[in-house]
Image: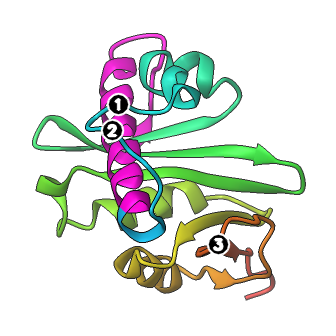
C-alpha cells in the first residue's frame, strides 16, 4: 500500500484501474437502473479520471495496492469540507480475496481525525459489508440518486 505517483509510472495503472471501476459501474447501472451504456464507452465526464488522473485528482490522495509486483487496487481520498470522501475504491477481480480492499480502506483511514464518507450502490452487497466491517455506518443521504447509500466513518477518541 502506498501513495500513487501520478506524475510518473502510476498514472497509467491508476487510469486503467479507475477505467475498470467505471466500466463495471456503468454496466451495473444499466442492469439495476436501466441507464443506457454502450459497450465499453464511458461518459465524457469520466475522461480525465482515466486519461489524466493527476489532473482529475489534483489535491486528492490516491492510494495504490500492489500484489506480486502488479498494481491491483486503487482508492481516492478527496477533501469534502468537514470530511474526506473515499471514491473509486477498486480491486482488480483477479486480486480479490487477498484483503486488498481492506488494506486500501485501512490506509485511507490511517491517522484520520476527521470523518470519512462514501457512497455505494445498494446492489454492491459485498462492498457494503466490507465498509461496515471497517467501521462505516449508514448516514442520511447527501446524494439524490436512487439506490445510492451513504456511509460515514468517524475516528473514535479516548479509547
Question: Which residue does the image show at 37% across and 47% down from the upper left?
Answer: 21
Q: Tell which tag, 2 or 1, sits nearer the viewer.
A: 2
Instruction: Where is residue 26? Give x, y as percent.
Output: 41, 50
Identify the residue position indicated by label 2 in the image: 38
| Crowd rating for badge 3 (residues with CA inside 10 Å; few <14, some 14–19, many 20+) | few
Looking at marks 3 and 1 on the same chain, the residue that comes earlier in the sequence is marked by 1
- Tell me the residue that label 3 is attached to: 146
User: CA–CA distance between discs 3 and 1?
Assistant: 23 Å
Q: Nearer the viewer, residue 1 or 34?
A: 34
| Distance of label 2 from label 1 (alpha carbons) | 6 Å
Q: Which residues are magenta?
A: 1-30
Do callouts 2 and 3 mark residues in contact (Cβ within 8 Å)?
no
Q: Magenta includes 73? A: no
Badge 2 or badge 3: first in the primary sequence: 2
- Determine the CA span between mark 2 and mark 3: 22 Å
Determine the secondary structure under disc 1. loop
**Image quadrant where residue 123 sits:** bottom left
Residue farthest to the top?
Answer: 8
Query: Residue tagged by mark 1?
Result: 41
Along the line of sight, which residue is nearer the eye, 20 or 31? 31
Marks 2, 3: nearer the viewer: 2
Report whether 8 appears left or right of 86. Answer: left
x and y, in percent, of residue 22 in the image: 41, 44
Identify the residue shown where x is 52% and y is 30%. 46
Front position in the image: 70 or 92: 92
> Callout 3: helix, strand or loop?
loop
Is residue 93 rendered to the left or right of residue 42?
A: left
- On the image, the x and y values in percent for residue 58 come to 66, 23
Amino acid at each position: 500500500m502506498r501513495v500513487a505517483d501520478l506524475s510518473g509510472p502510476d498514472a497509467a495503472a491508476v487510469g486503467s484501474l479507475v477505467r475498470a471501476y467505471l466500466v463495471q459501474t456503468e454496466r451495473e447501472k444499466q442492469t439495476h437502473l436501466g441507464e443506457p451504456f454502450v459497450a465499453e464507452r464511458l461518459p465524457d465526464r469520466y475522461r480525465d479520471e482515466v486519461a489524466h488522473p493527476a489532473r482529475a485528482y489534483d489535491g486528492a490522495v490516491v492510494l495504490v495496492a500492489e500484489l506480486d509486483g502488479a498494481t491491483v487496487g486503487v482508492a481516492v481520498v478527496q477533501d469534502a469540507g468537514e470530511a474526506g470522501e473515499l471514491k473509486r475504491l477498486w480491486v482488480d477481480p483477479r486480486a480479490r480475496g487477498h484483503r486488498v480492499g481492506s488494506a486500501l480502506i485501512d490506509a485511507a483511514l490511517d491517522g484520520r481525525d476527521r470523518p470519512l464518507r462514501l457512497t455505494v450502490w445498494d446492489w454492491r452487497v459485498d462492498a457494503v459489508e466490507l465498509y461496515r466491517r471497517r467501521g462505516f455506518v449508514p448516514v442520511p443521504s447527501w446524494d439524490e440518486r436512487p439506490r445510492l447509500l451513504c456511509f460515514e466513518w468517524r475516528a473514535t477518541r479516548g479509547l
